[in-house]
Image (cartoon, helix red, strand yellow):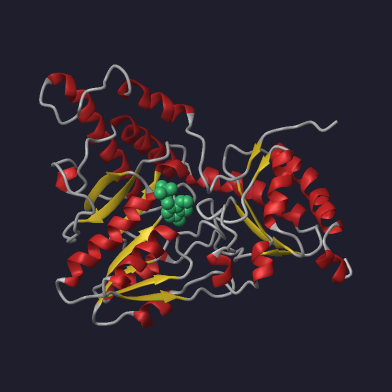
Amino acid sequence: MDKKRFVYADNAATTRVSDKVFAIMQPYFSNEFANPNSIYSFAHTARNAIEDARRKTTDAINAKNGNVYFTSGGTESDNWAITGVAAAESRKGKKHIISTKVEHYSVLNALESLKKQGFEITLLEADAEGMITPDQVEKAIREDTALVSVMYANNEIGTIYPIADIGAICRKRNVLFHTDAVQAMGCVKIDVENQNIDLLTLSGHKFHAPKGIGCLYVRKGIALNNLIHGGGQEKGKRPGTENVPYITGFAEAVSIAANTVNERVEYVTNLRDKLLEGILTIPGVKINGTMKQRLCGNINVSLEAIEGESILLALDMKGIFASSGSACTSGSLDPSHVLLAIGLPHALAHGSLRFTLNEENTMEDVEYILEHLPPIVQNLRNMSPLWREKGG
Ligand code: PLP
């Protein structure tokens, strides 16, 4: 009989709310439920909690020369940064934006909406390993470039981009620079000041805060149009009664993530490398993306002659949860736009499998995956005419 376990290896999709974060949030759901904008004394604790959270977040990313605005997460922050800068800069006649083909859809589709409004968009090509270079960015900058938006790390293949160097070029050329750091937080040291970042997106649920809370950092002096309109909360820039419990949880999670990068990278890299080593003993496996500049928990491989979805279902039966692309696009039969952008043929893109580990995974998890993955692949290939054609 199979010993069925629960191995969650999809931490790029979302993470568990940590006990510490949960505990910090609790009072603001119950005893301290006041609206932080009310003036009576009962509301002071909630108001102070928001401002403490802003200070913690500011410290975690060295945002002292700008503002941290709390939002509903990565999608909102990306949309706001891109459309807000575009609207403000277009008043100066700047209607060109540079980004990449490997961004998350919250960037790509925000850009698509701007294109319909007459903006010109340049999407940089990633190389076969998923990399984008500062030189590519520099060559694409024009007189009328309003914004460069390059993600800090890729959610599918884990590539970490040379953000400080790209930021330096943008600064030199007087172009604003936004980065979507949703996947990077906790795995790299983020310092908006020293890394020349003008606008930065974070999303809490990728590092043990709840879903539906994030922030946008905006350097002082940047003109940014609102995404939504309402009252005076968040200096009138992001109106709506603040989600006090989530904001406190977010800040605690940001703070823990930022202060434990080194331990996390060391621990998770070891797990990741063991898992990868085991996966590479399976025939017909190709690593997607570079191993040089890669998020510590990310494994993305393509397995010849079988579908990623079939592997996922079989893994699910064993209590192993992974992904065959980004969670937002699973459910669609289109292969991942990131894998296609780095030149994978459709067949290999369809055969992709992503494991994303974090500090809550253990070596036992890795061993359990390695016990079950090879026979699953073998079984599927036994049924695969494509594999037989290859003489496998
Ligand atoms: N950007 C990246 C790189 C992501 O991986 C995600 C979510 O997977 C998002 C943005 C969207 O974040 P949220 O789920 O908070 O809207």
> Which quadrant would residue 230 be assigned to in this image?
top left
Residue 282 % position (x, y):
80, 58
Quarter of the image with the C terminus is bottom right
| Residue 376 shown left or right of residue 206 in the figure | right
Residue 40 % position (x, y):
11, 21
| Residue 232 shown left or right of residue 167 in the figure | left
Residue 119 % position (x, y):
28, 74
Q: Name the residue located 33 percent from the left edge and 51 percent from the top edge.
A: 76
Quarter of the image with the N terminus is top right
- Position above or below: 98 against 159: below
Residue 183 in sight in this render = no
> Which quadrant would residue 127 be assigned to in this image?
bottom right
Q: Name the residue located 28 percent from the left edge and 56 percent from the top edge.
A: 80
- Position above or below: 333 against 357: below
In front of the other: 217 or 80? 80
Q: Name the residue located 54 percent from the left edge and 66 percent from the top edge.
A: 338
Residue 282 in sight in this render = yes
In front of the other: 370 or 269? 370
- Position above or below: 86 against 50: below
In front of the other: 333 or 186? 333
In front of the other: 13 or 67? 13
Among all residues in the image, which is located at the extreme top? 31
